[in-house]
Amino acid sequence: MTIIENELKKIIKLDRYDGPAELSDGKGLIARISHTASVTFMYRCRFEGRSLRVKIGTYPTTSLKQARRTHEIMRQLRRSGEHPRYAINAKPRKVTLKCCVQYWLTHYVPNLKPGTQVHYRSFARTYFTNVFNDRDIEKIHAREWMSWFDSISAKKPKTARSVFTIIRSCLNFCKSKFFIERTDLERIKKQHVGVGSSVGSRVLTMRELSIIWQAIDDSHASASNKALHQLTILFGNRVSEMRLARRSHFNLEDGIWTVPAEISKTNRTIRRPIPSKARSILLQLMRENDEILFPGHNTDTPITISAANRYIRSIRNRLPIDDWRTHDFRRSLSTESAKFGTLPHIIEKMLGHELGGVFTIYNKHDWLDEQLAAYERYSQNLFELLCN
């Protein structure tokens, strides 16, 4: 149950109150109401084995928003072993950007997908930790925020836009938890920071794909890193769907690769058939590795996305092919399969996309036979070029 501001406003106008003695806002924050319609916010909890009630303030002198913010500070103090009353008795605390980022990393980020967690923690280490030092975040002027974004944008305009988006998410979370009240970042519009990512249009030809495949074959990388990218060429999957794949995800007997929802971008299970060229690579991986098929330096953990990207950059720098990236493998699979006559909804399934309209709601068929035919035709064309 949540306390509603309008209810409190009505109550304090009464001469006498005969309703419930307490209203709960959750997690120990209550509004205690007397018969004379006086409203007092309190934090109710257990501390050092005893029941405890700490007065936060009287409404409307203490607003509901202020009470929630103080309540959140009290909860933090209690978790750290300090008495919640320090939130009332101590001087108002200064909250820095570093404090906000740490609070966000502790209470929000762990609920996200592993890959997203790695991405956000990497941004936090690189861009957020040492900026604005010990400044009170609520006193940082919009001009200072913009100057920081502009300094990033001067070298990496797309990164600047990403930094803005992520830090805004962080601070919005902190505000929703009443960890902070407001910041001047709210005055800045997204379109005024850096530039957005453009929609890719690069389609690698089958000849270009064969050159990349051969370069991977000839490189001195680990077998798992090479296989990761060659399988991605064959399947047109998202890199992390394969990078985080385990032995148990591949049913070679039935010829099906199942991407579980927890590592799928769509949060839905993806099923793909395994073409013959991919099967031979997977068999070799299974002979060499245990449950983790694409291990990094540590055999118990998958290769990191940064290591995978670093490897493909080294391949790209050695080839006389116009700028390309791993994600272009998906666009190439889609385009070439369409040339072979594969129907659009089959291609969407191969890419792991959700079909639109009523398909998403009612039609759960995966067209595995049709997908397999398209994969076999695609890999056959690729390997004919490799053999020439």
Image (cartoon, rainbow, N blue to C red):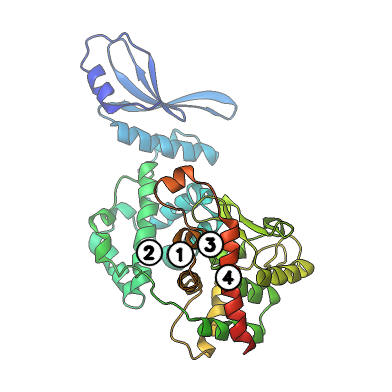
Q: Nearer the viewer, residue 374 or 122?
A: 374
- Height in image: 72 above or below 341? above
- Amino acid type at circle 4 is Thr
* Residue 91 seen in the figure: no
- Residue ID for mark 1: 123
Q: Circle 1: is it few (<14), some (14-19), or many (20+) Cα within 10 Å?
A: some
Q: Which disc is residue 350 wearing? A: 3
Residue located at (61% from left, 76% from top): 380
Q: Kindly indicate the quadrant of the structure image that contains residue 160.
A: bottom left
- Height in image: 203 above or below 60? below
Q: Nearer the viewer, mark 4 or mark 2?
A: 4
- Residue ID for mark 4: 232
Q: Are marks 1 and 2 in contact (CB under 8 Å)?
A: yes
Q: Quadrant of the N terminus?
A: top left
Q: Circle 3: is it few (<14), some (14-19), or many (20+) Cα within 10 Å?
A: many
Q: Nearer the viewer, mark 3 or mark 4?
A: 3
- Amino acid type at circle 3 is Met
Q: Are marks 4 and 2 in contact (CB under 8 Å)?
A: no
- Residue ID for mark 2: 163
Q: Circle 4: is it few (<14), some (14-19), or many (20+) Cα within 10 Å?
A: many
Q: Which badge, 3 or 2, comes first in the chain's sequence? A: 2
Q: Nearer the viewer, residue 189 or 199?
A: 199
What distance separates the C-alpha of mark 3 from that of mark 2? 32 Å
Residue 202 locus on image (x, y percent): 41, 77
Q: Which badge, 3 or 4, comes first in the chain's sequence? A: 4
Q: Nearer the viewer, mark 3 or mark 2?
A: 3
Q: Nearer the viewer, mark 3 or mark 1?
A: 3
